[in-house]
Image (cartoon, grey):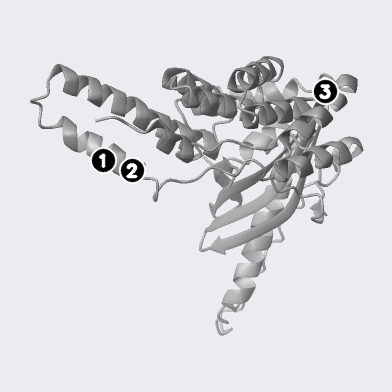
Amino acid sequence: MKYDRSVLLKALRLLTLVGACTALPSHADDYTDVSTLLRANKFPEAMTKVEGLLATKPADPQLRFLKGVIQRNLGKPSEAIATFTKLTEDHPELPEPYNNLAVLYAGQGDFDKARVALEMAIRTNPSYATAHENIGDVYARLASQAYNKALQLDNSNPAVPPKLALIRELFKPNLATTSPTPGTAATTAAAAKPVPVPAPASKPVATPAPVAEPAPAVAAAVPAVKPAPAQADDAAAKGAEAAVLAWAKAWANKDMANYLAAYGPEFSPGGQQSRSAWEQDRRDRIMGKSRISVTLTDLSVQVTGDVATAKFHQSYKADALSIASRKTLTLRNNGKRWLITRESVGN
């Protein structure tokens, strides 16, 4: 039972433009020009443009990423692999080049290398949803290879054919998740109204809570007035929004105590990384930067009971690095504050 590699490749999601390497304002027009050529499938022209820009900005990570995308679309996978590999060496903190390397390796039938690349993407960013989806598809392909080998060694085993059939059913062309077309650009938040992270403020002095005087014994009990559901939901949404902004502010200020405290006890970094290892990794990455800027745009919050879902575009800048991505935070109210229980990128 042979497996159609092209069917799997339709399921693997290649980032055609830089979802996490957004343009610095001074270079936005350059990136827009290349993106326009990509959307028009004018790959030779796009390559000429990128190479001209790289002549003056050879270290620019976004231009190098775009070059790799163009090389892939020009049918030069080996050159694209070389470009993305060098990008992972120079910017190991970016998961997207690892993801695209995995798709290119899968295209060559080297699913072991694809798996390793995706594991690196997830290790770099455990909440990177695209890499998790892709590695699931790669594991399925590796399973198919193993089942085929088992069938070759023992074709009388009745348990193997049904498993192969399940994988083939999973990747039927009409059910597969198609990858973005080569010219599809990642949506940017340039036109959205930014939700600025507040500037650092002096630490407030705690004010003792007033002590209520006991009511006279003869006074009738007055029932508490419960807010209308709409008012309660609005207040909860504002509380969750404030928690998200406080999290971003702590991140930008490298305030590790408040940054880590924004995550609830049930938060799991994903993969095989422990919570303590994740916290140490975050300390190393954040404190290793000389300056950090975090700006949220298009922030929306929906509340259902004690659970809130916050979706936004995140623009992150650290030293010479500039990254933008779509992010979702799930928060839970523990009765005192909203805490992050789940964090995902790209959805």
On the question of residue 184 being in view, the answer is yes
Q: Is residue 91 left or right of residue 276?
A: right
User: Which comes before the other along the chain, label 3 or label 2?
Assistant: 2
Q: Residue at x 49, y 26 (%)?
A: 107
Whole-number angstrom distance, CA of label 1 to CA of label 3 = 51 Å
Q: Residue at x 44, y 25 (%)?
A: 272
Give the residue type at disc 2: Leu
Give the residue type at disc 3: Ser
Q: Residues within 10 Å of mark 1 (few under 14, many from 20)?
A: few
Total labels drawn: 3
Residue 174: x percent and y percent?
39, 50
Q: Are marks 1 and 2 in contact (CB under 8 Å)?
A: yes
Residue at the spot of label 1? 166
The image shows residue 340, relative to residue 226, as above or below, that is: above
Give the residue type at disc 1: Leu
In depth, the one of 212 and 55 nearer the eye is: 55
Residue at the spot of label 3? 290
Q: Residue at x 70, y 45 (%)?
A: 185
Residue 234: x percent and y percent?
65, 68
Residue at the spot of label 2? 170
In depth, the one of 299 and 53 nearer the eye is: 53
Whole-number angstrom distance, CA of label 1 to CA of label 2 = 6 Å
The image shows residue 63, relative to residue 301, as above or below, that is: above
User: Which comes before the other along the chain, label 1 or label 3?
Assistant: 1
Residue 51: x percent and y percent?
82, 24
Q: Is residue 88 left or right of residue 127?
A: right
Whole-number angstrom distance, CA of label 3 to CA of label 2 = 47 Å
Disc 1 is placed on an element classified as helix
Q: Residues within 10 Å of mark 2 (few under 14, many from 20)?
A: some
Disc 2 is placed on an element classified as helix
